[in-house]
Image: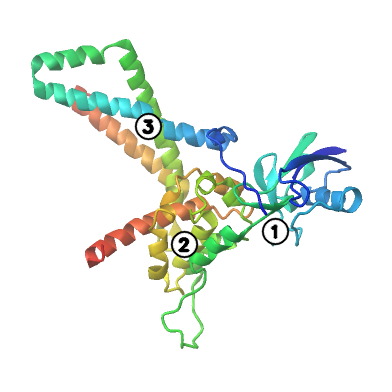
């Protein structure tokens, strides 16, 4: 005769490691809001000028800006966790030498920076 | 003196586990396993727990120390304040006191065929392997089958059908071995939902691993292998 403990709904509150994991996964919430904003923007653009202007007004509301700012920081936080895990999931060997984890992490941040610079140039035409 | 609270389970006298308190003398060298042996020898001979080597090799003395999976022999009372809580390993059925039923764990280990599978079983030639080839899997071969990673894994806690960290790590260890030719036999199981894909990279398994095996890395490397295998099967027309 044995007994088995079961996991409660609040299992993730037991350890800081679990809380950090749930925080990482929760970044999907503000990011979903950002995606919805983006998709609705494309739809409004398709509907015509007045709808597009309505959408722009809606996007300028302080709470929308705040949630989208949160989404921006959430995506950076998620990227930070992802970049830390990447060298463990995709270790890269070049001949006999394995590429150090910090080089892979730095490479990913460099890619993020390049994309940001590229889009800054595309949108504002200057750096 | 240190106070230790142990979750006890004596099925012949009670169906419900209970907590018993023990006060034991301790110095800087007293491990949790030393404390358990002191209790059994001096205070209560009915206390049951597993142990063997006392040096983090056999993997027998796994238990929860203040809610975290640990090896009793590698955990020292000096690192804890007054109150220490000992419980059996989480997510596994408890047989008695700190003894858990490891059957599910062992079944999962066996399922991944954790041995070298040869192309030619009649060959008597020794296998050759360079240090570079060995380096690819060596870290993952340090597992001592203690089961701490299963107690750390909420996905296994929610679904015991999940192969779990140690079994997938072992499968990956043999898949990476240049002497092995059994990857095609292991991949169908790793490709299932109960295989590598149940893992959500919580990462706690690697944090508690007493041998620094990093099972979370092995499981997620297996996901990459599983995805590659799916594409290969797709081109072969097997899907």
Q: Chain of mark 2?
A: B
Q: Residue B220: x percent and y percent?
A: 44, 52
Q: Residue B42: x percent and y percent?
A: 91, 50
Q: Chain of mark 3?
A: A
Secondary structure under the numbered disc 1 in the rendered image: loop
Q: Chain of mark 1?
A: B
Question: Residue at left 49%, top 56%?
Answer: B163
Could you tell me if residue B51 is visible in this image? yes
Secondary structure under the numbered disc 3 in the rendered image: helix
Is B54 on the left or on the right of B209, as rendered?
right
Residue found at the very far left of the displayed protein: A48
Tell me if label 3 and label 1 are in contact, CB under 8 Å: no
Position of residue B183 relative to residue A60, above or below, is below
Which disc, if any, is residue A28?
3
Q: Which residue is mark 1?
A: B60
* 3D distance between C-alphas at marks 2 and 1: 23 Å
* 3D distance between C-alphas at marks 3 and 1: 40 Å
Is B104 on the left or on the right of B188, as rendered?
right
Is A20 on the left or on the right of A28, as rendered?
right
């Amino acid at each position: 005769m044995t007994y088995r403990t079961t996991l409660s709904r609040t299992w993730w509150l037991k350890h800081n490691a679990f809380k950090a994991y749930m925080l990482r996964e929760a970044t999907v919430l503000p990011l979903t809001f950002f995606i919805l904003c983006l998709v609705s923007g494309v739809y409004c653009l398709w509907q015509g000028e007045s709808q597009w202007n309505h959408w722009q007004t809606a996007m300028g509301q302080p709470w929308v800006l705040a949630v989208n700012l949160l989404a921006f920081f959430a995506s950076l936080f998620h990227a930070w966790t992802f970049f830390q895990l990447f060298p463990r999931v995709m270790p890269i060997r070049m001949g006999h030498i394995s590429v150090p984890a910090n080089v892979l992490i730095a490479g990913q941040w460099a890619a993020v920076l390049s994309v940001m610079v590229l889009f800054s140039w595309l949108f504002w035409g200057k750096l | 003196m240190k106070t230790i609270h142990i979750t006890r389970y004596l099925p012949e006298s009670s169906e419900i586990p209970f907590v018993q308190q023990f006060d034991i003398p301790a110095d800087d060298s007293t491990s949790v396993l030393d404390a358990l042996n002191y209790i059994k020898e001096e205070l209560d001979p009915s206390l049951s727990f597993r142990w063997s080597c006392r040096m983090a090799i056999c993997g027998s003395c796994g238990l929860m120390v203040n809610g975290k999976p640990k090896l009793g022999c590698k955990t020292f009372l000096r690192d804890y304040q007054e109150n220490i809580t000992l419980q059996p390993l989480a997510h596994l059925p408890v047989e008695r006191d700190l003894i858990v039923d490891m059957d599910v764990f062992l079944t999962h280990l066996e399922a991944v065929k954790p041995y070298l599978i040869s192309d030619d079983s009649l060959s008597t030639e020794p296998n050759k392997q360079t240090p570079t080839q060995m380096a690819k899997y060596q870290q993952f071969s340090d597992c001592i089958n203690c089961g701490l990673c299963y107690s750390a894994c909420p996905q296994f806690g929610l679904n015991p059908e999940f192969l779990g960290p140690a079994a997938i790590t072992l499968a990956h260890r043999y898949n990476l071995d240049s002497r092995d030719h059994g990857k095609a036999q292991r991949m169908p199981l790793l490709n299932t939902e109960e295989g590598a894909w149940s893992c959500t990279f919580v990462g706690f398994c690697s944090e508690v691993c007493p041998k620094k095996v990093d099972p979370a890395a092995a499981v997620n490397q297996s996901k990459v292998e599983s995805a590659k295998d799916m594409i290969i099967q797709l081109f072969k027309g097997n899907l």
